[in-house]
Amino acid sequence: MVTGSWFGYQQLARPGCSGQVELAVAATPEVAPAVEEAATRWMTDGAAVGGTCIDVKVAASDPAEVAAVVAGKHGATLAGIGQASGTAVAPDVWVPDSSTWLLLLRNGGATAFAPENGASIARSPVVLAVPEPIATARLGWPEKKVTWSDLLDQVTSSKPLRTGIVEPTRDAAGLSGLLSLTAAAGASGEDARNATTGALRALATGRSALRADLLARFPRATDPTSVASGLSAAALSEEDVMAYNREQPPVPLAALYLEPAPMALDYPYAVLPGIEPAKAAAARVLFEALTTADFRDRLAQQSLRGPDGTWGAGFEAPVGAPSPAGGAVGRPAAGGGAAGGLDPAAIENAVTGWSIATQSGRMLCVIDVSGSMKNEVPSANNATRAQVTVEAARRGLGLFDDSWSIGLWTFSTRLVGDQDWKELVGIGPLATQRGRLDQGLSTITPSSGDTGLYDTLLAAYQTVQGGWEPGRVNSVVLFTDGKNEDADGISQAKLLAELKRLADPERPVQVVVIGIGSEVSRTELESITKVTGGGAFVTEDPTKIGEIFLKAIALRPTAPR
C-alpha cells in the first residue's frame, strides 16, 4: 500500500455515499488516458467527498481549444487563438501540456484568472526531432552535442535544413522551440535582429497548424530522394518522437536534446476558479491520485515522465535522453513545480514576433509630427519623441516580409493647405517600396502645428477601407502624443458616427492607436477603437513604444463593438 497523501485518498473514497457531483476534467490528449485510468480506479473504489459521490469525466482536449473557452470567459485575447465554439464549456480542472497556457491567459488580459494548485503531474522534454539519417549526416548524432546556435547555423545556411514547426501560438512544444531558437539568434551579436528575422521566416515557411500534419511530412521511405525531400527537423516533445517511432516508420526519428535545454512540457494541474466547494474538494483528492508511483507507471505507458523528470516502469528512453535512470522512484515532494523559470516578457515577445512574421497584412502607418513631438526623452539619450517613434517603426518594418503592403503618413494641423495629414508613401507592396519607406521615415521631423487627430484618423480609415484586400489584416496604426486640437476639424461625435456608418463586418479595418506621454487621453482613444475594433495602447515612457508597436501589430482583427 502507498503511504503519504494516498491516505487522504483512502479516507475520502468511502462507499455508501449519497448524491452526486460531476467533476469535469479536460486533459491534453497524451496525458488524458493516464488521468482517466487513475480517476476510474478512484471511482471503482467508491469516490466520495464528505459523503457525496463523485463522478469524474475526463475529456481529451486540445489545449488551444480550452484556452479559447477560458479566454472568452475572462475577457482575454490570445494571439493566434480564435473564438471558442458556441457549445464549448470551461472544465472544472484543466491539465494542459504546459504552464505557458496559464501565463498567456494572464498576459492576455485575464487578470482575474487565478487557478488553484498548478503543480505539474507529468513532464516531457522538448527535443529536436530529426530523421536518423539526417541527424547523423548533418548534426553528428548521437556522438555530438548540438546547441541551438548550431541549429541556427543550419537553418540559415546556403543549404538549410528543411525545418518545420507546429503553430507556436497554438502548440506549447512549438513555442518552446521558437523561444530557444530566437534566443540563440538574439545572442548573435550586432546581427541579432537580422538573425532573428531570418530564423522566424525560415520556420514560418515550414509551419503546420496541426501536429499530425507536421509529423506526416517526415520522410516515409528510405531512398535518398525521399529523405532529402521530406521534413528535416522540428521541435516536438519527447513523447511525440517516442509515439511516432512506436509505429515503426521506415525512417525513425532521432530525438536531439539540444543545449541549453528548452522549456519542457510540464502538464500543470489547474483547478479553475469559481467552481463549487464540493468540486474543489474532489479536485484536491483527484490530484493526490496523480502523485503516486502507480500513476508514474501509467505515465510511462504513454511515453511520459513523472513531474521531476524520472520515469516509471516500461519507459523506453530515446538514444541520448538525459537520465535520471529508470526504475523504482519515489513521489516528488510537491508533485513537481509547473511554472518555475517562465519568462513572461520573452514568451510575449516570441509570440508577437512570430505573429508579425507569419501573418500577411496591409497597413497604413500614421505618425504624429505636431510640435510636442519635439520634446526630448531623457531615457533615450534625449532623442525627441519623433525620433524614438521613427526608430520603433523602422525596427518593426524589418520584421515584415515582402507579402505585406505598407504606406506611411504624417499628421499635425494644416500640413498640406488646410489638410492635417500628408502622404509620404502610398500603401503598396514592401517587395517594391521597402527603400522608399525607409527613406520616408528618415525625412520625418516635427512641425509647429497642433494635433489634427480626428480628421486624420477618419481619412486613414477611409483610405485603408477603400483598398481593402481579403485574406489579410487591413489596419491603421497611428502614433500620437496628444489629444485632438484641431478647432476647425470634425468633432469626436462626428468621427464616431462616421466610423460606425463606414464599419463593415465583411471588410473589417483594424485601428490601433499608440499614445505616447501623459497628455494623451486613453478614454478618447478607446472610444475610437471600440467602434472600429483593434486597440488603444498608452505609455508615458516613449522608449516602450517599440515593443507596444510590435504587440499592437500582432493583434488579429476583432469585430467592431
Image (cartoon, rainbow, N blue to C red):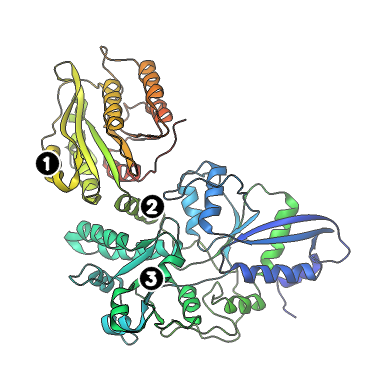
**Crowd class of label 3 (few under 14; some 14 to 19; many from 20; radius 10 Å):** some
Mark sitting earlier along the chain (1/2): 2
Asked if labels 3 and 1 touch by Cβ distance under 8 angstroms, the answer is no
Residue to which mark 2 is pinned: 348
Distance from disc 2 to disc 3, alpha carbons, whole Å, reads 29 Å
Q: Which mark is residue 217?
A: 3
Q: Please give left or right for residue 82 compared with residue 146 in the image.
A: right
The three-letter amino acid code for the residue at tag 2 is Glu
Decide if residue 289 is in sight here: no
**Crowd class of label 2 (few under 14; some 14 to 19; many from 20; radius 10 Å):** some
Residue lying at 72% horizontally and 54% vertically, measured from the top left: 279
> Quick one: SS at disc 2?
helix
Of the pair 453 and 430, the residue shown nearer to us: 430
Residue 341, how many percent across, how many down?
Answer: 44, 63
Of the pair 121 and 197, the residue shown nearer to us: 197
Q: Nearer the viewer, mark 1 or mark 3?
A: 3
Residue to which mark 1 is pinned: 436
Q: Nearer the viewer, mark 2 or mark 3?
A: 3
The three-letter amino acid code for the residue at tag 3 is Arg
Residue lying at 44% horizontally and 35% vertically, measured from the top left: 559
Q: Which mark is residue 452?
A: none
Distance from disc 1 to disc 3, alpha carbons, whole Å, reads 40 Å
> Quick one: SS at disc 3?
loop
The three-letter amino acid code for the residue at tag 1 is Arg
